[in-house]
Image: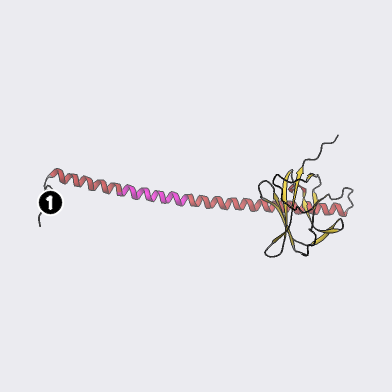
Amino acid sequence: MRGVSGLERPAVQWTYVICGLALIGISTWTGVALVRARRATAEAREEARQASLDREQTEASLARERAAREAFMLQLGRERHAAGDRASTPTLTLAPVKVRSARGPELAVPSTSSPVLQLRLMLPPRTTLDGPFTITLRSWTTGDVLWSRGSLHRGAANGKPAVVADLTSDVLTPGPYEVQLTAGTPPSEVAAYEVSIIPPSPPR
């Protein structure tokens, strides 16, 4: 077997040695960088998971606080009503819209200072469903769900079929809203409603 010409020269041998050492160094640096990258990725995933848990806990806490506040305000409204308070519970009566508005609700209603508001959703003609119904209140601008109430049954408002539910007035701060009434499993839309809550007129 013939040798490779030139390898017996010291300069060539040292060149191969230097190249080998360089390759070993590059491999070592690459391995260390890869380990560090994996460690950083794992830490980032753990931080993201912890942030998600914190956000879920915060949202759950806010939901509990809101539910407790709503229950308290509803109970307060019932007690005032039972005690014969002169100021009766205000009502918000909405009729179904045939076509959803593209520029915002046409109906505008002033906000109320009463802690409790009775929402009355008039049922469309020839509605045969008896429930249970679910009311979902959304921001007309963003579509975010702001309030929902289920297990509701057909009632009456102004002598006509309607679905009635009490809610705290702080849910309806000034702004445009859309309300969806659904029933059945899976839920199907019964009717849609739109309303804009505006600040009350200043006293003259």
Residue 187 occupies quadrant: bottom right
> What range is drawn magenta here?
27-43
Q: Nearer the viewer, residue 89 or 164?
A: 164
Residue 181 occupies quadrant: bottom right
In this rendering, position of residue 110 left or right of residue 100: right
Q: Amino acid at mark 1?
A: Val
Judging by the rendered image, the residue that carries numbered circle 1 is 4
At horizontal 55% and vertical 50% (from top left) the residue drawn is 51
Task: Provide residue 71's location: percent of width, then percent of height.
Answer: 76, 54
Determine the secondary structure under disc 1: loop
Q: Nearer the viewer, residue 106 or 41?
A: 106
Task: Provide residue 93's location: percent of width, then percent of height.
Answer: 81, 52
User: Alpha-carbon neighbours of circle 1 within 10 Å: few (<14), some, or many (≥20)?
Assistant: few
Which quarter shows the N terminus? bottom left
Judged from this view, the residue extending furthest toward the top is 204
Q: Is residue 28 magenta?
A: yes
Judged from this view, the residue extending furthest toward the left is 2
Task: Provide residue 194's location: percent of width, then percent of height.
Answer: 74, 49
Q: Nearer the viewer, residue 127 or 24?
A: 127
Tell me which secondary structure the magenta stretch mostly adopts: helix
Task: Provide residue 2's location: percent of width, then percent of height.
Answer: 9, 55
